[in-house]
Amino acid sequence: MLHDSYLDPDGFRLNLNALVPNLRNVTWLLQKQKAVIPDFATWYPEFQEACKKSEIMGWVVKSRNRITKESDLELLSSCQVIWTRNWLQRVEGTATFPPRMSTSEIVHALRHSKTPPVGLITVRRKWVDKALPSWELLAATAEAYSWIGQILWRAHKAFGVDRCDLADRSVECVTSALRSTLTRLPCMDLAQSELQAHFTMSGGVVKEEVEAFDPDPAKLEAAGERYGELKFPTSGPIENVPGFMAMARTMMEKDGHHATIAFLYNGERGVATRGLQFDDQNAKMLAFERLADLVESTRADGIVIISESWLAAPTERERQLKTIFFPARDRLDRAEGLTVYAATRDGRQVELLSMIERGPNGEASCGEPVEVTLPAGANTFTPIRRKWDDMEKRGI
């Protein structure tokens, strides 16, 4: 698939060179069958006239001729590089690299530049054809796909049917149903965050681990049997913190651990729930950056995080310098806590903390929750607040 090879220059070029002629071949096949398609001479010329006015369909026709008769499309690639040193230090820049330069080669070049050797590198590529400079190529081919889908719908309608005889495809949103309008399939509406890769400064790949929660009735019934009656809070994010803490304590004492879970809100309406997984600080920063992207796409204006956390008081030297040398997870004197914290776009924030004591067999006991005046979750909200500020500037 074109999307799957986006970060691989050779693979992307190969898939694009296969896709564009195939898009054009659909119209050729229709024309070859015109004798058996009802009223073809009436409605097909109307489609041709509409295509002549379409920048995208004009590009498909010309590109097919270039690929089959001349050479590859002349692709250009821009590259946005984001360096995240820590929660508070994040630098963005745009660089131009040779189109055939692989993402790993780009990262290698960045690592040997003036970039400090710590933190996380995010590389976002953008492919365009020199003959269509105003369109990103995934968006352009998705638009072309919608045109082809529309003409296939019209051809089927001529026979009095509205579905294709072919079975549904492996991609969930590509079905045998046909569309009468120029509408892109949902799986082709991609966020920029899906066209990027993440690396440590040592060159290791960091994977995004953000999982959607499926409200499966069977799973909910099983949870009720295990934890008893859990009262899910139904107000706004700030007001829901005590209720979520009560749920989290019940689950923590039953299971001995608690996953990191994010609840996104628009007003008092929940719009998304995600589970976050991370093995180190880089993966954690990446998970919350990805969560910030979801905040924008869902237009969320509030968020609640439930998390099991390591806690430690700063040393006297750290207090003097107002910096942290050793994160709590690396400290010998660390303590364990269960936190529920919330923030809203209008600036409100609250956190409850329940300290965890472990029994001889590792069983967990949660203390009474206390409100934290300096929320431990403040850093993890930094990408969210940055996203809200950016949305405000853009009037979203």
Image: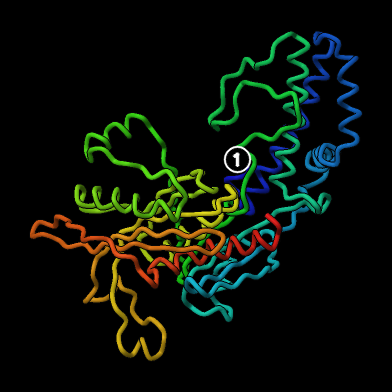
State the residue in front, 304 or 178. 304
Q: Residue at x 73, y 20 (%)?
A: 153
Image: 270 above or below 81: above
**Residue 187 location in percent, x, y?**
60, 38
Q: Quadrant of residue 78?
A: bottom right
Residue located farthest toward the left when viewing the structure as drawn: 360
Q: In this view, does 345 lie to the left or right of 56?
A: left
Q: Name the residue under label 1.
A: 1
Q: Which of 196 and 225 is in front in this view?
A: 225
Q: Where is residue 52 in the image (x, y as percent from the top left)?
A: 90, 34
Residue 96: x and y in percent read 70, 67
Residue drawn at the location 34% of the way across and 65% of the way down: 371
Residue 61 position (above or below residue 254): above
Please state the horizontal and vertical placement of residue 278, each as a whole percent of the image: 38, 58
Residue 361 in view of the camera = yes
Count of numbered tags:
1
